[in-house]
Image: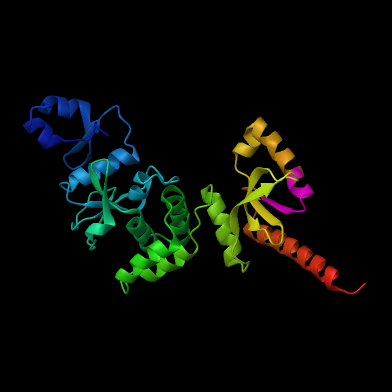
């Protein structure tokens, strides 16, 4: 991130000439520049946004989540700042909101919302499905839990969006390995199924763990897994998937495999049929001989 500069500062300090600034750099925000041949990554844009604020803002939201190590943050996402400015340039969202000192930390020489405060802002300002996806990734990266975030929501009780945050955090699960897994878990939860367990360890007949299931209900031995593109394009992965599925079924699991082309209602129907099958089995066991 060393290539992002405040143009007026760099010229005043003699680190660059006005001519070089004009010809070799491009402005990404007012008075904030990046070399013409350098891509404007989210991290560079985040530093640039912080510099644009005069180094007085706090980075939050998706940009902060990415700084904390969360995956799946779109490189084109706007940089969200806690900063009192009503005329933020394109690509920056500035919010005039209070934040306590214990809700911030320093990352990459910038003042950044702590993981818990970042979660609060994700839950308050993103649409529910997007919020859960980003909360899943943040939980996986930082280890934050629902009680951590709910504690902070008490501090901001009555503030706009806090109720939405509580609802999103209740669905947060750091076991998701992709946005599609988060989406799939949300689909099933909203369809009335009991809460799913994620990253279910599988043991072979000798007690050795050989794999994890994406999600499911261990007590019913029903697994639901999302197959991404790498499952089809990587031959070694494909071969292992075939072998793994054989082992899963040999252990008595019902396995619902989901791909991108599946329609939501079809996914829900297949899972319902798996549950109905297990319920029939349970009834058969209870009936007298």
Nearer the observer, 90 or 175: 175
Look at the image and give the residue range highlighted in magenta: 247-257
Colour scheme employed for the rendering of this structure: rainbow
Q: Quadrant of the N terminus?
A: top left
Q: Is residue 96 within the magenta segment?
A: no
| Residue 250 position in % (x across, y down) | 79, 48
Task: Report if residue 156 is visible in the image.
Answer: no
Query: Which residue is at 69% across, 47% downward?
Result: 203
Q: Quadrant of the C terminus?
A: bottom right
| Residue 81 position in % (x across, y down) | 26, 53
Residue 102 drawn above or below residue 192: above
Q: Is residue 277 left or right of residue 128?
A: right
| Residue 183 position in % (x across, y down) | 54, 55
Query: Which residue is at 38% across, 63% downward?
Result: 149
Q: Is residue 14 left or right of residue 188?
A: left
Q: Is residue 136 left or right of residue 238?
A: left
Residue 108 image-quadrant placement: top left
| Residue 86 position in % (x across, y down) | 19, 58
Query: Which residue is at 38% across, 58% downward?
Result: 119
Residue at the extreme right of the image, as rendered? 289
Task: Report if residue 70 is visible in the image.
Answer: yes
Query: Which residue is at 39% across, 59% downward?
Result: 126
Looking at the rendered structure, the number of numbered marks drawn on it comes to: 0
């Amino acid at each position: 991130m060393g290539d992002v500069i405040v143009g007026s500062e760099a010229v005043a300090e003699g680190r660059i000439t006005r001519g070089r600034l004009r010809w070799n750099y491009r402005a990404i925000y007012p008075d904030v520049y990046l070399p013409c041949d350098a891509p404007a990554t989210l991290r560079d844009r985040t530093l640039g946004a912080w510099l644009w604020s005069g180094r007085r803002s706090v980075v939050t939201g998706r940009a902060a989540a990415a700084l904390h190590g969360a995956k799946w943050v779109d490189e084109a996402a706007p940089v969200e700042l806690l900063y009192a400015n009503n005329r933020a340039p394109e690509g920056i969202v500035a919010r005039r909101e209070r934040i306590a000192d214990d809700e911030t930390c320093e990352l990459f020489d910038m003042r950044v919302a702590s993981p818990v405060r970042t979660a609060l802002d994700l839950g308050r300002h993103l649409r529910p499905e997007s919020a859960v996806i980003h909360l899943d990734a943040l939980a996986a990266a930082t280890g934050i839990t629902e009680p951590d975030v709910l504690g902070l929501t008490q501090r901001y009780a009555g503030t706009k969006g806090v109720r939405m945050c509580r609802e999103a955090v209740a669905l947060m699960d750091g076991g998701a390995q992709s946005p599609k897994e988060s989406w799939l878990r949300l689909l099933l939860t909203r369809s009335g199924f009991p809460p799913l367990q994620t990253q279910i360890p599988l043991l072979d007949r000798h007690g050795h763990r050989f794999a994890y299931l994406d999600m499911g209900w261990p007590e019913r031995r029903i697994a639901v897994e999302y197959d991404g593109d790498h499952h089809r394009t990587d031959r070694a992965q494909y071969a292992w998937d075939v072998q793994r599925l054989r082992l899963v079924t040999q252990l008595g699991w019902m396995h619902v495999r989901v791909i991108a082309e599946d329609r939501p209602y079809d996914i829900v129907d297949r899972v319902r049929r798996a549950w109905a099958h297990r319920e029939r089995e349970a009834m058969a066991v209870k009936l007298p001989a």
